[in-house]
Image (tube, rainbow, N blue to C red):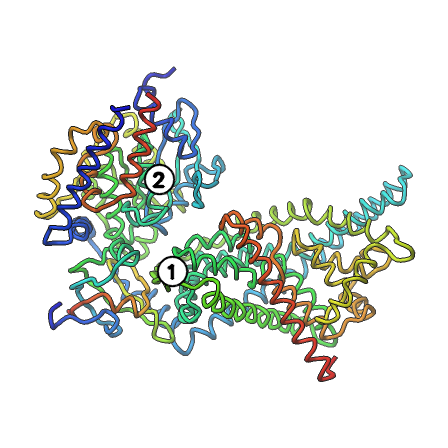
Amino acid sequence: MNLTIGDRSKYRGRVMREHFGISTTGEQYIIALAGNPNVGKSTVFNALTGLRQHTGNWPGKTVDNAQGIYSYRKKSFLLVDLPGTYSLLANSVEEEIARDFICFGKPNATIVVVDATSLERNLNLAFQIMEITDKVVICVNLIDEARKKKIKIQFDELEKKLGVPVIPTAARNGEGLEELQKAVYEIVLEKRLTQPKQIAYSQEVEEAISVLMPQIKPLNIAAEVINPKWLALRLLDSDSSFIESINRFVNMYKNIK
Amino acid sequence: MTSLSMPLSSLKLGEKSNVVYLDVKGLLRRRILDLGIVPGTVLTCVGKAPTGDPIAYLVRGTVIALRSEDASLIFVKQS
Amino acid sequence: MATIQEPLDKLLKVYLDAECIRTTSNIPIADRVVKDIFCQSEHIAKSVIKQEYSRQKSLDNRIDKIVTSRIFAYPIMIILLGIVFWITITGANIPSKMIATVLFSFQDVLTQWFQLVQAPAWLHGVLVLGMYRTLAWVVAVMLPPMAIFFPLFTLLEDLGYLPRVAFNLDHLFKKAKACGKQCLTMCMGFGCNAAGVVSARIIDSPRERLIAILTNNFVPCNGRFPTLIAIASIFMTGTLALFQKSLVAAGTITIIVLIGVAVTFAVSKILSETVLKGEISSLVLELPPYRKPKVGAVLYRSFIDRTIFVLRRAIVVAAPAGAVTWILANIYIGDVSVLGFVAGILDPIAKVIGLDGFILMAFILGLPANEIVIPILLMSYLSTGQLTEFANLLELKEVLIANGWTWLTAFNTMLFALLHWPCATTLLSMYKETGSKKWTFMGFMIPTVIAFTVCFIIAQAAYLLRLA
């Protein structure tokens, strides 16, 4: 038993993944692949996993699910292709699935694929994900398209500002994929720590959050499962589907214990 | 709504505008917000379908097509 | 159990507190949250992008101006469609002949082997004349067009043109109270109706999704194309030169497809006003930038994909169907074969709609896969139940005419092929996507009723006017 992967919270995470229809060997790291629609997410997925993939549906839903495996430096990674979404505010089945998986499935890392030619809009999802988890790698894809359009981006600067690894790629040509795998590897094995830039909300919002936080922090579920600030925001958003999800997963956790 | 604001649908081809107010509800509202159309956002009319409807708008580097009934629920002021 | 309930109860209380804050706030908090995130995204993006790209002044925009203009939009769409069909038809010619030559000559080898081991004639009949022959026919005639059409369409898709088609046609969908994205599902349906049904997931509104699913069948899939091409080609033979023949065939198919599109709109509208009444939902359609597809890679992957798919279907469906057909053609009830017997029963109904019993039976037997309709039909016509080799289409035409085909038969058969019930795979997909037996049944009945009705009207009108 490889203890570096197996500790109790991770074990629970694994069982939960079975709720998501994902079967993994004991030693695999689970990596979520998120991103807006039309950013070349499937290209990244295919480029990394090649033929070692299989597609199906998320359990109980008519939404595509693809999983694939790749190896890097003798470690095995299971890549889960989440449905393409513009945000994690659940307005659709796809967003619910993506949100639930990142929040409760607790992947070892999440790759957020963004479109280099449309950075501004794509960062919306990235920030939301960075509020939930700090194990994030931003994959700026379609840099070949950006080059054609003479768009110049300072990736180092972006990395500094976002506080997480930023890897430029052109998955169609195989560019940047090695660096992407390396960044994921470092994050997952905690050889590299991240400090994701949090969103600075306007005053009224921060005030509302600070009113709720004292009530949320003592709830054990918050600390174990979700970032308390994210939870406060979901509550302020009147996101009842999120509350339902919490119910479901907390019960599952307790049952495993 | 100030007297300067007008529905997005009356924006002419090539004209730029800033969002003032969203009179949209339900699922459409969420979709609009997802795309980053919030008060202050710059919207440019970049194209129309052969019959004049739907209309294509440039928002944050992306081109989105909306039907004119839906676009008329977004209030903007010309910039 | 108390330990589980406690935090959840407290959570509920926090939820209610949050509701209170939300409703008493003087700003819409949820919207402000979204705005704040975008403000930050905007700020950071602008600070790291050293050189921007103006979509408004771009080539993309200039292309769109033409492609969505009042003058050019429709002609471009129709001509593109025609070109795609033309390339499919012309490109498929030579490979078809080559494959046919190879496979049919191999049949002689097989026959020799059977003779060598002194196998009984009926075994030879089932396996070689029935199973192998049908398999060979499907591979030779159906595979090349399918293997060419799919990659072409994938190229168009990768290019980014298809959302523009949805953009141009949305006003028609709005009139039918359907969603403009249905256009995209129809495009998928050209490849395969089952895939078209699954692609309806891109439509948010369940009502509009159902409309897209139920009407997808009116777009002819890859399996029906060769049927349409075959009939069109056979009946266009004559003194036309090869090039003109392919033009006329492409033109005929384009017209048939346009009929299918018109039927789709009509049926969508009817559904919206009767069993699927409801709210019109909004359209939010992204027009992505045009991308130069990696032509080589797309063609290659798509081509291999399609070839494997068709071959697999041929082995799993066509071969057994061929065997079964041969058996039914060679088992006799009295002095008529089972095939002939059933065709005879179906004949009166079929004649009323301008077809004949054998054609109707072939369509029925073609439920598993549309590609096998023509092979079965030809096998039935030849009383020996054997698919003869056709050195050229002229011989084929003679067989059909010898069996009573007129222009009406050809035309109505093409219409019936376009409009009739979906294949088994599509029906299965419908069931999986809708989860409803009732709607799957409707998905079967609606095309069937329309196919019969349309063919009836045309046939009767033709008879009445003494045109046939």
User: Is residue C275 or residue C384 the one in the foreground?
Assistant: C275
Image quarter hosting the N terminus of chain A:
top left
User: Is residue C312 or residue C289 the one in the foreground?
Assistant: C312
Q: Callout 2, which amino acid?
A: Leu
Q: Which residue is mark 1?
A: C290
Q: Which residue is mark 2?
A: A33
Image quarter hosting the C terminus of chain A:
top left
How far apart marks 1 and 2 lie (CA) works out to 24 Å
Q: Callout 1 environment at 10 Å: few (<14), some (14 to 19), or many (20+)?
A: some
Q: Secondary structure at mark 1?
A: loop
**Residue A252 in view (yes/no):** yes
User: Is residue C356 or residue C93 the one in the foreground?
Assistant: C356
Name the residue at the bottom extreme: C465
Q: Chain of mark 2?
A: A
Residues at marks 1 and 2 on the same chain: no
Residue C208 location (% of width, % of height): 43, 60
